[in-house]
Image: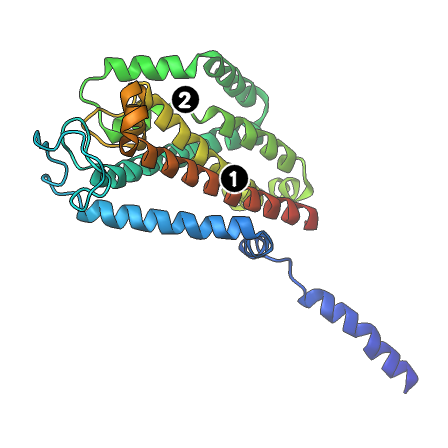
Amino acid sequence: MEKANTTKEARVPNKDVKSMKAPSFLKLIEKELIKDKAASMSLLILIGILLTVFICATFLNSPGSIRINLEKLNQGPSSEYLLGTDASGRDMLPQLFQGARNSFLIAFGVTLFGGIFGTLVGLCAGFYGGKVDHAMMRLLDFISMLPRLMFIIVLVSLIPNYNVTTFILIITAFSWISDARLIRAKTLQQNSLDYVQASKTLGTSNIVIMFREVLPNIGSMIIVNLTLNLAGNMGLETGLTFLGFGLPFNTPSLGTLIGYAATPENIQRRWWQWLPAAILIFTMMLCINFVGQAVKRAADSRQRAA
């Protein structure tokens, strides 16, 4: 009887160990957000800003919503114009909503397309290695030596009648290099592990190993990288547009609105033309950074648990 009880008690821990599962990456992110009040508050603020911006920009997207009114030039905030008007008499509030939407969509598009292309290049270089890795890395070295901002400015100046889509593609062409290097380094690390070698021994195709086994194991790191890149790309778009090499003047963005601050008179007397856009871009980038740091800590916790 004692032997049976001993055997039963010995089996209980094994059963518990088998039933224990490692927490998913989303659960770890949720745990970090609950622990970090600043990150959770930043996420709520960011969601609220994006919902407000996209909803209001959709309803205020009619052709007459931002019309020139020569009788209302440079007017301050009032009941008729909550954020005043610009030098052409256009209402600043619809411009703020549409500009924030355009800036976020540009940053999101650059982050997404650059992340996809950089992930594909990094996966191929790190997984195949050898001549493939050598050729791709030499290409990355050459592109990274080019002055990115100068080439973006030249392309924007040469392409006539460019729009939001064109601007996204131009920035993306020079924004995937760091993603590719990071993915390559992580893929090289994964490529030396036993599960990859075992899959190769069993005859599993390289495409299946890369996308079904290696990619999920570095997925958390990719999410962290894309989240942090989003804030940087918003700043890049705003800076280029402020310098006059971003979106056309007739296409609102946070950069075009902050560009009003280039005039000393506007800085001193017409704060409503540039200050709301500056506060909005600062708040959005700060919120994205707080959330990104929480996601990064969750990825580190998952890596330690693994």
Q: Position of residue 70 (x, y in %)?
A: 8, 29
Q: CA distance from mark 1 to mark 2?
A: 18 Å
Seen at 63% across and 35% down, the residue is: 191
Q: Is residue 204 visible?
A: no
Marked residue nearer the N-terminal end (1 or 2): 2
The residue wearing badge 2 is 174
Q: Amino acid at mark 1?
A: Ile
Q: Is residue 140 visible?
A: yes
Q: Position of residue 135 (x, y in %)?
A: 52, 17
217 vs 95, nearest the viewer: 95
Seen at 33% across and 37% down, the residue is: 276
Q: Amino acid at mark 2?
A: Phe
Seen at 53% across and 54% down, the residue is: 26
183 vs 172, nearest the viewer: 172
Q: Position of residue 165 (x, y in %)?
A: 26, 31
- State the mark number for residue 222: 1
**Quarter of the rendering containing residue 134:** top right
Looking at the image, residue 3 lies above or below residue 118: below
**Quarter of the rendering containing residue 283:** top left
153 vs 270, nearest the viewer: 270
27 vs 71, nearest the viewer: 71
- State the mark number for residue 303: none
**Quarter of the rendering containing residue 65:** top left
Q: Position of residue 305 (x, y in %)?
A: 69, 51
Q: Is residue 118 left or right of residue 166?
A: right
Which quarter of the rendered picture does the N terminus lie within?
Answer: bottom right
Q: Secondary structure at mark 1?
A: helix
Seen at 29% across and 46% down, the residue is: 53
